[in-house]
Amino acid sequence: MDRWKQRTDWAEWQTDMRLSQPFIAERVYRSPKTLDKTEKEVVDLVVAHGGNSILISQKAQENPEGRSPEKNALWVRKKAKECFSQLSGAIRNQARPMWCEHWPRGRVDFPAGLPHVCHGVVLVETFAAVDLASDTEELPLACSGVPITYMAVNDFVNLAAELRTVPELLEYLASRRTIPLCSLRVVGDEKPLFEFYLVEGNSLNGCLGHDDAKIAIAARSSELQDLLRLRAEETFYIKAIEHVADALSTRDSDFAEGLSPGMTCTPKTSPD
């Protein structure tokens, strides 16, 4: 971590790398900026797919173990508001020309603005569940028609690792909107919801919240273990394909040296 001045910068880079493997590096963009002289950072991360994009605003702690539970909850609520403020600005200004420095592709321009924003995600680092219900008015569940999800950083990264594709992630986030409103503002306790989603055949319909999900999973633990084993077997082969795609998207600039034109495929220099 010596290359990073702050742990928060390192954490943002870590999220970028963790999302780049299943979603392919070419589709994950960090810190897009406006093209004007201010070069203001618009949002922390953009995951683009099929003409749509997910915007992510993230806040990490310099010392995640240095706060009491009470102070951690206060920090999470404060930073969630800051994340929503950044997301709302990015959503309102998504059509402005932007650019970013993409680690495998170099400079990438968005001359017409970001791809259509279909979801916004607020990520805050916490290792204990925090209920944001007391800040409901300042933490809305949508902005200009774009749904907003509140989640812990670790939970979101784990979801990406489990679901593996952007469409499946969006499907999960959409199903998650069916749980009671009070549960939509709880961050740091995603595992029971995801496990309920699995045993119910990729659906959260009928889930009454985190406690209800835990009770349901406890009663169906054997079924859950069978599903997890099956997913692990499927993921083994999926990861092999992802590795090839990732290697192609992050190849060296001189990869074509010595190869005939028919054996090369030049990476694109602008996003989908």
Image (cartoon, rainbow, N blue to C red):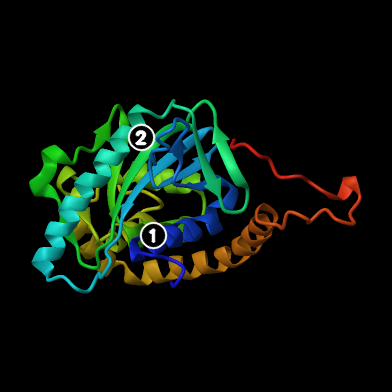
Does the image show residue 180? yes
Instruction: Indicate the quadrant containing the N terminus: top left, top right, bottom left or bottom right.
Output: bottom left
Measuring from the top left, give residue 171's x and y in whole percent: 42, 44
Mark 1 lies on residue: 9
Amino acid identity at mark 1: Asp
Does the image show residue 179? no
Q: Judge from the rendering whether residue 238 lies leftward or rightward of residue 153; answer left or right.
A: right
81 vs 42, nearest the viewer:
42
Disc marking residue 105 = none
Instruction: Indicate the quadrant containing the C terminus: top left, top right, bottom left or bottom right.
Output: top right
268 vs 120, nearest the viewer:
268
47 vs 62, nearest the viewer:
62
At 33% across and 59% down in the image, what residue appears?
153
| Image position of 115 with respect to 22: above or below | above
At 35% across and 66% down in the image, what residue appears?
7
Helix, strand or loop at label 2? It is: helix
Residue 42 is drawn in which quadrant?
top left
Measuring from the top left, give residue 213's x and y in whole percent: 24, 59
Mark 2, Cα crowd under 10 Å, few <14 / some 14-19 / many 20+, is many
Mark 2 lies on residue: 90
71 vs 207, nearest the viewer:
71
Q: Which dot, 2 or 1, sits closer to the camera? A: 1
Q: Judge from the rendering whether residue 262 lies leftward or rightward of residue 119; answer left or right.
A: right
Helix, strand or loop at label 1? It is: helix
Q: Is there a contact, CB below 8 Å, between mark 2 and mark 1?
A: no
Mark 1, Cα crowd under 10 Å, few <14 / some 14-19 / many 20+, is some
Q: Judge from the rendering whether residue 166 lies leftward or rightward of residue 245; answer left or right.
A: left
Amino acid identity at mark 2: Ala
